[in-house]
Amino acid sequence: MRTYLVTGGAGFIGSNYIHYMFKKYGNEIRIINVDKLTYAGNLENLADIENRENYTFIKADICDTEKINAVFAENDIQRVVHFAAESHVDRSIKHPEVFVKTNVLGTLVMLNAAKAAWELPDGSFKPDHKFLHVSTDEVYGSLEEDGGYFYETTPYAPHSPYSASKASSDMLVKAYMDTYKFPANITNCSNNYGPYQFPEKLIPLMINNALHGRKLPVYGDGKNVRDWLYVEDHCKGIDMVQEKGRLFETYNIGGHNERQNLQIIHTILETLREMLPDSDPRKAGITDELITFVEDRKGHDRRYAIAPDKIRAEVGWYPETTFEVGIRKTIEWYFEHEEWMNHVTSGDYQKYYDDMYSNR
Ligand code: NAD
Ligand code: TYD
């Protein structure tokens, strides 16, 4: 039975990936999930699979060399899928240090542990052992509004502390592949949305605020463009790259779904109005008047857009969920998981929200 070590599996994409993999492979695989459970990590995301015999959760910091080495020593890990990271640009602008620690040093710890466990005396690596580093399109910087795409060959030009720390981690993975022929891949994906996304990111924040009749804070002119991908399509891409991609290669993942932030917000409002029954008291409060323009994000990247040509041609990946279907599924999920939202927005969330938005 093949064993996967997933880092950051209690977060948004990691938990979706674990669900996806069990749905696809059932009991053919074993998954060990290593997560520190920061504010973004939530074991509720995995409640329905936590008792599986082929699943183990280990609470650990990826910067903790001893613990990570022990996980490799005690298990024959054949696949690493490395999600664990600090992932929110706004937080990175206020508190960059933890981004460098987790995203850069944590990745180095993961690389060293896998290398030590997999390297053979002649310097080659155990066959069929692979590391996949999950990264972002934000490492490529910002595109002009009127053209161009991010290709795998686009030079790195990160602007935020978040994207700079992810770029650094990508460079470390590239260095291990170049120097040691360490068996790895990197994927750079566009913005994800879907179930289990923490409401500090655009889409769940707007859904949650609208349902509570709260203002919808739009940074700047609201015309920044992101290329949105339904999270399950990302998970499928990661699995396909690991099984069908060429080792040492980078693959961009995105679905040609560029939208301005204001367009996204209008779609959310319209879909909420359509989906809520007239008897629901929240419906009347969901109006365009909630939209409020606030001070722009510092260094706000204007446009991201992925060219997914390579992953399509080499791996056969394509996105299955259109935005229209994906946003409905996402909203439906938030309707059905009000308790989840109540839990993640209790405690520190209010303080975060006040820090980020009260004087904006
Ligand atoms: P997330 O913030 O929802 O989850 C991150 C997870 O990592 C959490 O469970 C958290 O507890 C864990 N974690 C954080 N620091 C840790 C540490 N030191 N040790 C162990 N665990 C730690 O993030 P996400 O949106 O699921 O993103 C996952 C990965 O995908 C990240 O590497 C991110 O850069 C990348 N990515 C995200 C997007 C997106 O749109 N969300 C797009 C492209 C790439
Ligand atoms: P976000 O979800 O934080 O993802 P990223 O910055 O990694 O792309 O933000 C997506 C876009 O939405 C980005 O242009 C910033 C904007 N945004 C707002 O306008 N208001 C908000 O409250 C948030 C969280 C984001």
Image (cartoon, rainbow, N blue to C red):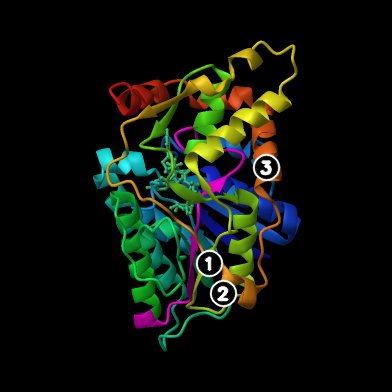
* Numbered label tally: 3
Whether the residue carrying mark 1 lies under 8 Å from ligand 1 is answered with no
At numbered mark 3, what does the secondary structure look like: helix, strand or loop? helix
Q: Say the numbered circle drawn on residue 310.
A: 2
Determine whether label 2 and label 1 are within 8 Å by CB: yes
Left or right: residue 247 versus residue 353 is right
Q: Quadrant of ligand 2?
A: top left
Can you say whether 244 is above or below 299 in the image? below
Measured in 3D between alpha carbons, the distance from the residue under mark 1 to the one under mark 3, in whole angstroms, is 35 Å
Find the magenta span and give its range: 178-201
Position of 360 relative to 309 (above/below)? above
Kindly identify the residue that appears in the image at 61 percent across and 42 percent down: 194
Horizontal and vertical percent for residue 147? Answer: 45, 63
The answer to whether residue 308 is left or right of residue 145 is right
The response on whether ligand 1 sits within 8 Å of label 2 is no
As displayed, is residue 151 above or below residue 217?
below
Q: Position of residue 203 (x, y in %)?
A: 53, 37
The amino acid at mark 1 is Ala
Q: In which quadrant will I find the N terminus?
A: bottom right
Vertical placement of 100 versus 205: above or below?
below
Residue 183 among magenta residues? yes
Q: Which mark is residue 307?
A: 1
3D distance between C-alphas at marks 2 and 3: 34 Å
Sequence-wise first label, 1 or 3: 3
The numbered mark, 2 or 3, whose residue comes first in the sequence reads: 3
Label 3, on which residue?
49
Label 2, label 1: how many angstroms apart (C-alpha)?
8 Å
| Quadrant assignment for the C terminus | top left
- Taking the view exactly as shown, the residue that stands out farthest to the front is 146
Q: Secondary structure at mark 1?
A: loop
The amino acid beneath tag 2 is Lys
